[in-house]
Image: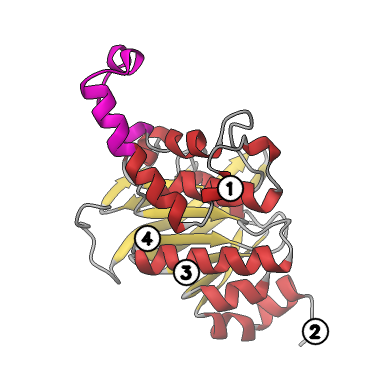
Amino acid sequence: MRAPDAVAAGDTLLAVDNVSLRFGGVKAISDVSFDIRKGEIRAIIGPNGAGKTSMLNCINGFYHPQEGRITFKGETRRRMRPYVAASQGIARTFQNVALFKGMSTLDNIMAGRTLKMNRGFFWQLLRYGPAMAEEIAHRKVVEEIIDFLQIEHIRKVPVGKLPYGLQKRVELARALAMEPELLLLDEPMAGMNLEEKEDMCRFILDVNQQYGTTIALIEHDMGVVMDLSDRVVVLEYGRKIADGTPDEVKRDPRVIDAYLGVAH
């Protein structure tokens, strides 16, 4: 489903160097640096207000840091618009589900193919000839994703009528439809019950292993983080306090104090 990657597995796909972000006099991120390697699941954790979502917003161009730089696939940038980030291979999901509630599951996922479509508005309006052939090709990709995430039974259901866990899965499907090289997941299991979390964990691992998609994951469930991630970076009040493997991070006294709330 994806063209050969320019970045080899294990090499740095994205680097965050000394990034700082301010809103007026409030510092959301202060001089944070870390990298994400091709093919890994990289967790970003920390207590509420640590700057995790702000960091994802900087990576995909929604926020523009006042200091530092972000390098993606060897290209360094200070400013980027979200649609440019998407066209270069960065997709994301959100803390609060951001779907078109009146549209079906299928149509929501098809929306993720928009950047891949080459025919102009006129051809799309006619739904004839080359435009129809293109839509059929994109529909085939979407149907494969629907099968992969086991949501065939809701493909024609308006997403506003779906339970929260399935809406989260549809949002993941729409992000996958963009064929991202880097997938940003912002609390993909928030509000889910245990069974829904287990399903989502399995799908995230399958996306990483079968599609080869690099994943940056924000998640509060420490069990999920320790089971899924290859490396973990920990933020507190906008600053990085730890970075390493899950085993290294969970033994770090600063993480225990800041995140787990357990005296050491």
Looking at the image, which residue is at 55% across and 46% down? 170
* Label 3 neighbour load within 10 Å: few <14, some 14-19, many 20+: some
Which dot marks residue 82? none
Q: CA distance from mark 4 to mark 3?
A: 10 Å
Looking at the image, which residue is at 59% across and 66% down? 199
- Where residue 228 appears, x then y in whole percent? 53, 73
Q: Nearer the viewer, mark 1 or mark 3?
A: 3
Which of the image's four quarters has the C terminus?
Answer: bottom right
Q: CA distance from mark 1 to mark 4?
A: 22 Å
Dot 2 lies on which element?
loop
Which dot marks residue 263? 2
Is residue 70 visible in the rendered structure shown here?
yes
Is residue 24 visible in the rendered structure shown here?
no
Which range is magenta? 114-138
The residue where tag 3 is placed is 205
Q: CA distance from mark 1 to mark 2?
A: 28 Å
Question: Which callout, 1 or 4, points at the residue further toward the start of the chain?
Answer: 1
Near-viewer residue (161 or 55):
161
Q: Nearer the viewer, mark 3 or mark 2?
A: 3
The residue where tag 4 is placed is 213
- Where residue 175 appears, x then y in whole percent? 46, 46
The residue where tag 1 is placed is 54
Looking at the image, which residue is at 49% across and 38% down? 106
Image check: 55 left or right of 191? left
